[in-house]
Amino acid sequence: MTDTLRPVENAVIEPSHSPQKLKRSIGVIGGTLLTLSCVTPASTLFVVVPDLFGSLGTATALTIAIGSLLCIAVAFCYSELGTLVPSAGGEYAMVSTLAGRLAGWLVFVLSLLVVVIVPPVIAMGTADYLAPVVHLDPAMTGAGVMLLATLAGLLDLRANAWITGIFLVLEVVAAGVVAVLGFTHSRRGLGSLVSMQVTGSGGHTDTVTAMLVVSGLAIALFVTQGFSTAVYLSEELENPRRNVARTVLATLAISSVVILVPVVAITMGAPDVKALTGGDISSMVTAWSNSAVGTFVSLCVALAIINAGIVMVIQNSRVLFASARDKAWPEPVNNGLAKLGRFGSPWVATLVVGVPGALLCFVNLDTLYGVTGVSVTGMYLLVAVAALLARRGAHTTTPAWRMPLWPAMPVLLIAVLAYILSQQETSYLLWTGGITAVATLYWALYLRPRRDTRWLVSIPEDAQV
């Protein structure tokens, strides 16, 4: 690489502001609870999966299963890189260290796209699932959820692990209820999972093509995307060299089961393909049981969305905190975002994430789902490239968890992800590409000319041994 990252100790750091470190306070269980809460299986099942049902019909379960298998390779990359470079910067710290500063900066921008768009979009779904109890305005409710998540994000991370853990139990119970009801009211066999049928715009049944499944993989990858949160928490995990990998892999396994099993049950239990394509899971649950059970499941989903908001604010604030500590912005901005509060949380970064997220609830963000899918796929692609470079030079002897089947695993992943990107809608690619181009200009005009004082990705000293 022509512009690879130099060790921080050899770079010129502005003297009055030494890098701050987050407090190590959680183990594998706490980290897994927080990470699972970011995957938020129930809100994914009830908010994201219905859109997949609408476009993929009976092929939805197969698409999610393929996406989960691909995520195993992605999780291997995250586990190795997250233990090699345990930083709150997550993907951008890993990629910057191994593939160069520009690549790391682009990953940072892609991750920002994901973390800015997703929380308010999911938060706006809260009102729909509170409807059995009270009718609320979706935008106002979403904004309230974002502000509540912001307040929770200011607390100690250990306290948040317990809060989100309790909510997580409720949403897993809701997903389990849906699975049991779907299987006990099954109308078709396992063969329906590969029947590839969807109801078209004219009301007739169409066949789902293989290309449509491939294009749907970008959203399917997003379904379990939250397992990467373990990497963002690596500075606050005890013994990160061991626990980051355990948390990443455990979270992917649990979330895949919690999401995929109910999807299979819904596919088999839906009255017909038209009802399945409609994606109204709450109505199907009520039809399988009664209104009381439907209300219980809806309330659990509402809590799951609040839970997801809390964890996403926590995750996203850590990314901004790390970017400020690594001098990504003009100095006044860096000083503000790097401030730690009474409970050890980056309070300014938390407010910067949460308050704009509340405002975004009043903006129509539906079309940005496609941008999110492209961003996640592109981010995974660059992480896979970094994993391919993870065993060269000094990194060869650095203590870290090492993935099996290297380098075949990242090479295969790069090829598959590049093909998935090529099958996405042009408009989504243009939006993401345009934002990436602007980010590249910022790099070229501001960061690169100041390479000795800006974008100095650091690894906490206690994580380097």
Image: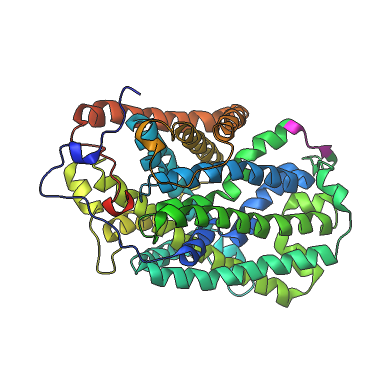
Outermost residue toward the bottom in this view: 292
Taking depth in this image into account, of 211 and 392 the one nearest to the observer is: 392
Name the residue furthest top: 2
- Residue at the location (80% across, 43% down)? 199
* Relative depth, front residue between 196 and 426: 196
Residue shown at the point (39%, 41%) measured from the top left? 94
Left or right of 30? Residue 4 is left
Image: 69 above or below 440: below
Q: Residue at x 89, y 54 (%)?
A: 188
Q: Give x and y (percent) for residue 399.
A: 40, 46
Whether residue 156 sits left or right of residue 416 in the image: it is: left
Q: Position of residue 345 (x, y in %)?
A: 31, 63
Provide the residue span drawn in magenta. 206-210
**Residue 198, magenta (yes or no):** no
Can residue 137 be seen in this snapshot?
Answer: no
Q: Up-down: is 344 above or below 86? A: below
| Residue 288 seen in the figure | yes
310 to the left or right of 201: left
Quadrant the N terminus occupies: top left
Q: Which quadrant of the figure has residue 354?
A: bottom left
Instruction: Point out residue 454 in the picture as x, y percentages from the top left corner.
Output: 22, 36
